[in-house]
Amino acid sequence: MARYHIETYGCTSNRGETQQIEQALREGGHHPADGPESADVAILNTCTVLEKTERNMLARAKELDNETPADLVITGCMALAQGEEFQSADIDAEVLHWDDVPQYVLNGECPTITPDTETVLNGVIGILPIARGCMSDCSYCITKQATGRIESPSVEENVEKARALVHAGAKEIRITGQDTGVYGWDTNQGTSLLPELLDRICSDIDGDFRVRVGMANPKGLHGVREELAAVFAEHDELYNFIHAPVQSGSDDVLADMRRQHAVSEYLEVVETLDDHLDYWTLSTDFIVGFPTEEPADHEQSMALLRETRPEKINVTRFSKRPGTDAADMKGLGGQTKKDRSKEMSEAKMELMAEAYEEMVGRTSSVLLVEDGTDESLVGYDEAYRQVVIADAQERGLEIGDTVEVAITSHNTVYAFGEPVERAQVAD
């Protein structure tokens, strides 16, 4: 697993975010490094209270960029409010929301945020792990050694867990698992039960709530892509959001990664959802600098990125994990990985900025799920795109409310909205 180095600046709220990041990393099997020079990833949790603070953050980010041989992640208040400043300073880093840091550190591996399949209620967010384990055998992933092959509870059992979360106050149910796309493969002759589960949750449970589907590998989605797209189109409770990590645009590299899917299958999943949904979010992951990735392979990944135009993209430089087959491969040079990561990250920011720019002027239904800075609240629209209402608390809005919002502007990775109608207030 990854060795991480994390530094935190600013208020107690920032330090609380760091504690949550570290807890998720430790639950995922990662451990702290002795310092940035020995870390697989360095994380800088920033503050932006004063102009002098901003200068200090930029200076420390540049130092960490030079000290850390692998990835640098920048999060926190300055990252969210002025993320473009780091790019302007030529700092090679991923600028992420606090919540996205643990997933990024997974380095393309299956998530292991929850140790079992028990539900968790965190405020108005209910976490529902629908299965444990996966059916993949990726050459770079160590998680499989910890989780094993998939074990799927019945659809009925998961529906009852979702119902209990809603009755306990959940307004958003997050469907999670090492690979939600292969849920039911062990009990349903290799065919996913995910569409049936989602349909049952939305049809059988009374209440006002939304459902977000967690990471699903393209192979599991491909066989049920038509059924899944139809379920999304039918139920407003479902966020129109799919996280399908392709990892490479080269079939040769995918074969070396043992990813099970081909690029064509990933494209067919995307095309099917495009056919059924007018407004949706594609989230995907790319690993750059895999040991067998040639320049032409990288160009294929860049071409695939531009062709499918995901609205949310995780870009990770390959990092060896002990005990995996890929750890024995002769790696690419650090500068090569750094250059390819930078090229893809720049393209990623352009695509994300374009997606959020297209939202401006749109009216969306936003579910508020967490506190922001000052008087703001943070929520997600129908396609699970992040929207911030700056003066939400002054307006009397609360976490758990669903609000009709006019999108007025954006900050590349999230939008700003102005309420136009109070759609629902939580009890």
Image (cartoon, rainbow, N blue to C red):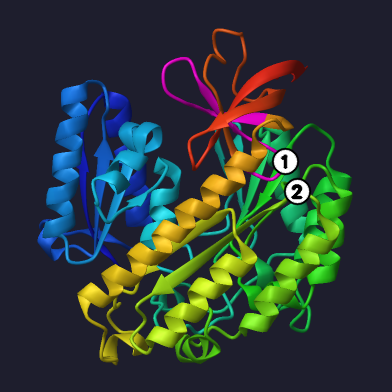
Would residue 388 be found to the left or right of residue 64 on screen?
A: right
Residue 289 falls left or right of residue 308: left
Instruction: Examine the rendered structure and indicate whether residue 75 appears above or below residue 227.
Output: above
Q: Nearer the viewer, residue 73 or 165?
A: 73
Residue at horizontal 27 percent and vertical 56 percent from the top: 92
How many numbered badges does the structure rendering display?
Answer: 2
Instruction: Please name the amino acid that badge 2 sits on.
Output: Tyr
Marks 1 and 2, how far apart at CA: 8 Å
Q: Which residues are magenta?
A: 367-385
Q: In terms of depth relative to the viewer, which is nearer, 316 or 236?
A: 316
**Can residue 246 be seen?**
no
Q: Nearer the viewer, residue 122 or 83?
A: 83
Q: Give the structural element (helix, strand or loop) at label 2.
A: loop
Q: Magenta stretch containing residue 264, yes or no? A: no
Q: In front of the other: label 1 or label 2?
A: 2
Regarding residue 73, the answer to whether it shows in the image is yes
Q: Is residue 240 above or below residue 376?
A: below
Q: Which mark is residue 414?
A: none
Is 405 rendered above or below residue 358?
A: above
Question: What residue is rendered at 26% in x and 21% in y?
Answer: 49
Across and down, in percent, residue 376 comes to: 50, 20
Task: Give the labeled residue for mark 1.
Answer: 382
The image quadrant of residue 30 is bottom left
- Identify which amino acid the numbered label 1 is placed on: Glu
Q: Would you say the residues marked 1 and 2 are in contact, meaning their CB atoms lie under 8 Å apart?
A: yes
Of the pair 359 and 2, the residue shown nearer to us = 359
Residue assigned mark 2: 279
Q: Position of residue 237 (x, y in %)?
A: 79, 42
* Rendered location of residue 226, percent (x, y): 84, 69
